């Protein structure tokens, strides 16, 4: 046997305790002051660059992703003006190519997942009763790389060097022969950066969920949003490498002279499509499952009852993703693959409607059996259910191979994917912002303007996108910059353009509401919606340390236990673990959430910012063929990582030495 | 030992969970209870997927190939097999080093880590020699692109692993890694095991399967 560990500082005054019983107590004013001093980020530019507060990072994600949504939206409106009537002359074909590519890249990669990451970043620790994410610095890194990737793409776009071969960038069109400019290389570098950002973000969500839940929050008590983001994150770990690799190989084909996609030397263009869609289809679910989680968590609040079929919805979330890995070929039905493969993947694509339907019926049942209070968030959530069904039906239609051959590359597919992505992402997101805005800002959004903006958006959306089904059935191909007057598509296109501007008006009303309410909205209080989950038990906006005491959880709806009165047990929110010896929170077991370690959390650090900067620099070096720059920046990345990883005595990553007067994580 | 103590605590806590909150718990980065350990597992999952896709590309293009595969005939296995044994041996050495760290034997830990580093470096040098012997390069044909990209990806991982081993030695020397706190070592060595395990997949695909399938069609 080894000698027993000292259990308190008094046992060995030279060393801090490697084990201790976590102190328990009640949250009083002195405790809160002490925690505030420990957790607060420094003011000014130092805090700006070095903060690791998940709430600050979450809001940055939300705002940045929303700005990208607006940019992508303006691109879409320009295209809609061009297409409003036949023989449009507003845009040249080259400009149109860059616009539709950047619109896709922006919405798919710079808006849809980052937006959901924003929600999860802000809410994740609040939902599970933790003071921080598992890797606060990784969190900052993830945001900075996302920001720099977006800046790289948009800086190139403004120079006319933005991606222009469609967001899925098929070879040989995106190969060097047909696309000699820097455009596709810019896209490749941007995607490599985004891949790193998404991967480190996903690692963070996964480890946080499995290790940081408050005592008693066993895995079957976490909110559905957590299930959604967890599923998306695991899928990202498995899927992102496919697209990062595809873009790296493409860049090598273009700039180094390899032959992966080059038929003449034994390569295959279809390899690109496989790698891209092996990533691409799971990604579709990664950008909708967390949004569906937002709805699953929001509906109970406004229907005043628990979600119907919690376990079924959680399981269907994961089943959707599991099946989502077996359907990528349905993006390639028209590429001449063997019939056996087409039948298999077509069938798998149809089967996916089963878990989706489970969730839909659970939502409908929740509204049906509850006492719905039609506030603005519920309007968005209920609208989402309708749009999801419509997008789902057109999805099942295109899962049928013969019909897909007819509809492939037409506006029908454009209509389908917009119903899915706007319906299942944008509507829940806007509803989610209405729902959590009081938590973010401490103020309510204007209810009347919220309801109006919903109706304008909902009507505009359907006027805009429903006719696309018709233009598609009439044979209008996607990605054409104009069409002839006798094509028979003119009226459908005009209606679409009108609808898109109505939708944009709804978005503007929403922005006005946010800006007005941020300063002048009614003061919200801790729990303005009488909502059931943990984030509503703390002040709005939450203090830097989130929870003054770490609560103990006894049910899925800790704030509704008295109302539901299902069991005699009650969660303890006012009394719990104190953990005040520096930045600390509790680590717990993966399934049962039994505390098994006191985690020391790192404080502010500049290393994430610089690592992101140097990584971007290295890829820009590759882009410019400035090999010295790429090499120097790679070394700088290594140096930043070294500072980051250096064992810290404060975090008890190593034993403190006599020489350690003070030390901190870099 | 720290890990054992920590795990015992977790087990005890699980056994009587109503009083779980007043048990002594490890503080800070305690071996496999540290967040870093779980982060590494996640990293390994995504890295393994990356190598999976590299090999997917390899077999996808191999399966549709119509010429000899590899173009200059079946690979000579003698040196690659020895090299594979070297890399696996360095994993064993790293495991011995980890045992020494946990047992509080600092000199032994330094020696074992150092030997693992040297053997790993030998692997990298021999692999560079293998590259040098090839009659084709990255740009000759699709096999050359695949061969150099896949082994290049692996070699890059070996170099990162070697840098980590070097860093771990320095941290042992500074007294940062020792019996009570060794999460960084456990994590670094696990990464090294992963790099070695991935080589088995790469080696099997690139060196052995051509013997099995020949040039196909």
Image: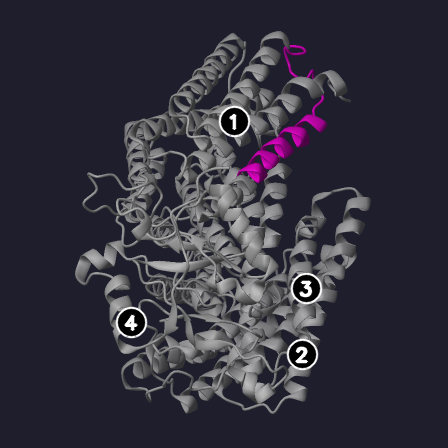
Closest to the observer, B76 or A224:
A224
Mark 3: few/some/many CA within 10 Å (<14, 14-19, 20+): some
Residue A655 drawn above or below residue A43: above
Badge 1 marks a residue whose secondary structure is helix
Closest to the observer, A80 or A226:
A226
Structural distance between the alpha carbons of marks 1 and 3: 39 Å
Residue A546 visible, this orientation: yes
Residue A277 drawn above or below residue B21: above
Badge 2 marks a residue whose secondary structure is loop
Q: Which residue is mark 3?
A: A315
Q: Tell me the tag on residue A308.
A: 2
Mark 2: few/some/many CA within 10 Å (<14, 14-19, 20+): many
Residue A52 drawn above or below residue A560: above
Highlighted range, magenta: B47-76
Chain letter behind tag 3: A
Q: Tell me the tag on residue B95.
A: 1
Q: Which one is earlier in the sequence, the residue at label 4 or at label 2?
A: 4
Residue A156 drawn above or below residue A423: above
Q: Are marks 1 and 2 in contact (CB under 8 Å)?
A: no
Q: Position of residue A29 (x, y in %)?
A: 27, 77
Q: Which one is earlier in the sequence, the residue at label 2 or at label 3?
A: 2
Closest to the observer, B163 or A398:
B163
Q: Are marks 4 and 2 in contact (CB under 8 Å)?
A: no
Structural distance between the alpha carbons of marks 2 and 3: 13 Å
Structural distance between the alpha carbons of marks 1 and 2: 50 Å
- Magenta stretch containing residue A651, yes or no? no
């Amino acid at each position: 046997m080894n000698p027993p560990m000292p259990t308190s500082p008094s046992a060995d005054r030279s060393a801090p305790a490697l084990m201790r019983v976590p102190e328990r107590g009640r949250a009083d004013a002195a405790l809160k002051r002490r925690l505030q001093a420990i957790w607060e980020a420094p003011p000014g530019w130092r805090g700006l660059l070095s903060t690791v507060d998940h709430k600050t990072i979450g809001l940055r994600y939300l705002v940045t992703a929303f700005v990208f949504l607006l940019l992508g939206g303006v691109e879409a409106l320009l295209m809609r003006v061009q297409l409003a009537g036949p023989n449009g002359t507003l845009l040249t074909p080259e400009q149109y190519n860059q616009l539709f590519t950047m619109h896709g890249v922006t919405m798919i990669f710079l808006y849809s997942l980052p937006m959901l990451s924003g929600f999860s970043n802000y809410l994740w620790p609040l939902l599970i009763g933790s003071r921080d994410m598992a890797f606060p610095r990784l969190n900052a890194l993830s945001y900075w790389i996302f920001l720099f990737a977006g800046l790289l793409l948009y800086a190139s776009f403004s120079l006319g060097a933005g991606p222009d071969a469609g967001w899925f960038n098929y070879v040989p069109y995106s190969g060097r022969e047909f696309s000699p400019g820097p455009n596709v290389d810019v896209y490749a570098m941007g995607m490599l950066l985004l891949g790193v950002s998404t991967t480190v973000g996903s690692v963070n969500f996964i480890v946080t969920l499995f290790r940081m839940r408050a005592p008693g929050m066993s895995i079957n008590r976490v909110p559905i949003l957590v299930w959604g983001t967890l599923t998306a994150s695991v899928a990202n770990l498995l899927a992102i490498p496919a697209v990062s690799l595809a873009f790296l190989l493409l860049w090598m084909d273009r700039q180094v002279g390899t032959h992966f996609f080059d038929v003449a030397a034994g390569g295959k263009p279809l390899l690109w499509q496989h790698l891209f869609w092996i990533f691409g289809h799971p990604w579709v679910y990664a950008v909708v499952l967390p949004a569906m989680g937002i709805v699953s968590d929001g509906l109970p609040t406004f229907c005043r009852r628990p979600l119907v079929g919690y376990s079924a919805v959680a399981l269907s979330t994961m089943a959707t993703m599991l099946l989502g890995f077996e359907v990528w070929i349905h993006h390639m039905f028209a590429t001449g693959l063997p019939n056996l493969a087409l039948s298999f993947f077509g069938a798998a694509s149809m089967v996916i409607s089963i878990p989706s339907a489970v969730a839909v019926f659970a939502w409908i049942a929740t509204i049906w059996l509850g006492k719905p209070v039609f506030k603005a968030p519920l309007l968005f959530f209920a609208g989402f259910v309708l749009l999801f069904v419509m997008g789902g039906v057109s999805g099942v239609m295109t899962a049928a191979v013969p019909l897909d051959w007819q509809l492939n590359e037409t506006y029908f597919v454009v209509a389908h994917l917009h119903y899915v992505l706007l319906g299942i992402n944008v509507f829940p997101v806007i509803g989610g912002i209405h729902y959590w805005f009081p938590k973010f800002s401490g103020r309510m959004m204007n209810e009347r303007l919220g309801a109006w903006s919903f109706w304008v958006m909902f009507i505009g959306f359907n006027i805009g996108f429903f006719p696309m089904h018709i233009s598609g059935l009439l044979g209008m191909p996607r990605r054409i910059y104009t069409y002839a007057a006798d094509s028979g598509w003119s009226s459908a296109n005009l209606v679409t353009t009108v609808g898109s501007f109505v939708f944009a008006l709804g978005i503007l009303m929403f922005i006005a509401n946010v800006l007005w309410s941020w300063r002048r909205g009614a003061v919200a209080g801790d729990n303005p919606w009488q909502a059931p989950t943990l984030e509503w038990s703390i002040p709005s906006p939450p203090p830097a340390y989130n929870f003054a005491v770490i609560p103990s959880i006894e049910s899925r709806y800790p704030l509704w236990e008295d109302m539901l009165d299902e069991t005699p047990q009650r969660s303890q929110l006012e009394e719990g673990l104190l953990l005040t010896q520096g930045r600390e929170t509790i680590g717990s077991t993966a399934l049962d959430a039994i505390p098994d370690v006191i985690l020391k959390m790192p404080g502010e650090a500049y290393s994430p910012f610089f690592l992101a900067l140097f990584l971007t620099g290295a890829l820009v070096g590759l882009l410019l063929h400035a090999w010295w720059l790429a090499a120097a920046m790679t070394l700088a990345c290594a140096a930043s990582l070294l500072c980051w990883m250096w064992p810290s005595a404060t975090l008890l990553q190593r034993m403190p030495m006599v020489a350690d007067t003070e030390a901190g994580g870099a | 030992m720290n890990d054992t103590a920590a795990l015992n605590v977790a087990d005890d806590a699980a056994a009587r969970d109503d009083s779980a909150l007043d048990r002594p718990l490890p503080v800070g980065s305690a071996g496999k209870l540290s967040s870093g350990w779980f982060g590494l597992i996640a990293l390994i999952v995504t890295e393994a997927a990356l190598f999976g896709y590299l090999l997917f590309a390899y077999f996808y293009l191999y399966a549709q190939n119509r010429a000899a595969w590899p173009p200059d005939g079946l690979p000579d296995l003698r040196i690659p097999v020895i090299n594979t044994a070297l890399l696996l041996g360095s994993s064993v050495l790293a495991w011995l080093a980890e045992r020494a760290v946990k047992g509080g034997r600092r000199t032994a830990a330094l020696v074992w880590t150092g030997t693992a580093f040297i053997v790993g470096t030998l692997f990298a040098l021999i692999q560079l020699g293998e590259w040098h012997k090839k009659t084709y390069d990255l740009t000759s044909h699709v096999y050359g692109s695949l061969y150099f990209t896949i082994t290049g990806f692996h070699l890059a991982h070996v170099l990162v692993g070697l840098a980590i081993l070097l860093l771990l030695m320095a941290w042992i020397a500074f007294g940062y890694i020792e019996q009570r706190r060794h999460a960084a070592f456990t994590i670094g060595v696990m990464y090294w095991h992963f790099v070695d395990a991935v080589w088995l997949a790469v080696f099997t695909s690139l060196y052995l399967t051509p013997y099995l399938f020949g040039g196909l069609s």
